[in-house]
Image (tube, rainbow, N blue to C red):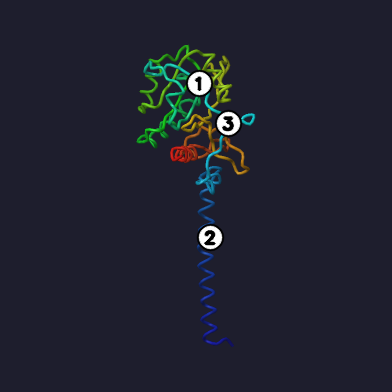
Amino acid sequence: MPTGSNSKKKYTYVWVSAIILIFGSFAVYEITKRIKGGSIVENDRMSVGMQHRPLAFIVNEGQRRKVPEFSFLDQDSVVISNKDYLGKVYVVEFFFTTCPTICPIMTKNLVEIEKTFKDDDDFGVASFTINPRYDSPSILKKYAEKYGITDEDWHLMTGDQQVIYTLAQEGFYIFANEDEEAPGGFEHSGMFALVDKNGYLRSREDEYGNPLIYYRGTIMEKEGVNDEGEPQQITILKEDIKKLLAE
């Protein structure tokens, strides 16, 4: 027959076990709920343990890839070159104003990023139209006004179409092409490139140590994942911009 002391220990063990079971069940419930809600996705796994890791340089044939020289007119008819971005961290995109599919989403994501860094003079955005025959400076100005683009370091640029396509495909390895069968008449990537203050392309690495190179710009941050199960990458892009600004 157990003594009084042993009985107390027994009941203590029972209560401790019950508490562990309750909190353990709650934790499992919360994790399950987040998975169902799409909040535990690739971005969560990629953020863990990577907050303090420096971003990788994008390397091609043993050389760090740098933004090539460019010079175009922006929405204010001002000539903007790659030199205007030196000393700034900036995001690069290729778009067109009449795009009926991914461009509006990309622009909204960039507007949210712009708001996050609105007080930082060392942040900017470089948007290059892939339909320069239509997207004149005045059209780009109206587009900027439509989406509330106010940052003076966000330049929407237009110029010679072939020069822009060469910049996209050979400078950034981002696909852009005229295609009559594509929605809006043009086909292009919905990815963002990230550039550091010295003009080098940078990104975080995946779990295998390979640089991401680009960031998915076609999924809203609040959406979490798209219908194909691809996670948004705006959250990690914001994190990585902060890293480069601190360098």
Q: Name the residue nearer the viewer: 241 or 24.
A: 241
Q: Which quarter of the figure has residue 109?
A: top left
Residue 231: x %, y % from top left: 54, 39
Sequence order check, earlier mark of 1 and 3:
3
Report if the CB atoms under discs 1 and 3 are less than 8 Å apart: no
Q: What element carries label 2?
A: helix
How far apart marks 2 and 3 lie (CA) works out to 49 Å
How far apart marks 1 and 3 lie (CA) works out to 15 Å
Determine the residue located farthest toward the right in the rendered image.
Answer: 61
Tell me the crowding category of disc 3: few under 14, some 14 to 19, or many 20 or more residues within 10 angstroms, Cα based.
Answer: few
Q: Which amino acid does label 1 sit on?
A: Glu
Q: Is mark 1 on a helix, strand or loop?
A: loop
In the visual, does 197 lie left or right of 118? right
Q: Mark 3 points at which residue?
A: 64
Q: Which quarter of the figure has residue 61?
A: top right
Residue 206: x %, y % from top left: 59, 41
In the visual, does 122 lie left or right of 40? left
How far apart marks 2 and 1 lie (CA) works out to 57 Å
Q: What element carries label 3?
A: strand
Q: Mark 1 points at which residue?
A: 69
Report if the CB atoms under discs 2 and 3 are less than 8 Å apart: no
Q: Name the residue nearer the viewer: 159 or 107.
A: 159
Q: Name the residue nearer the viewer: 116 or 194.
A: 194
In the visual, does 201 lie left or right of 209? left
Residue 53: x %, y % from top left: 53, 45
Q: Mark 2 points at which residue?
A: 25
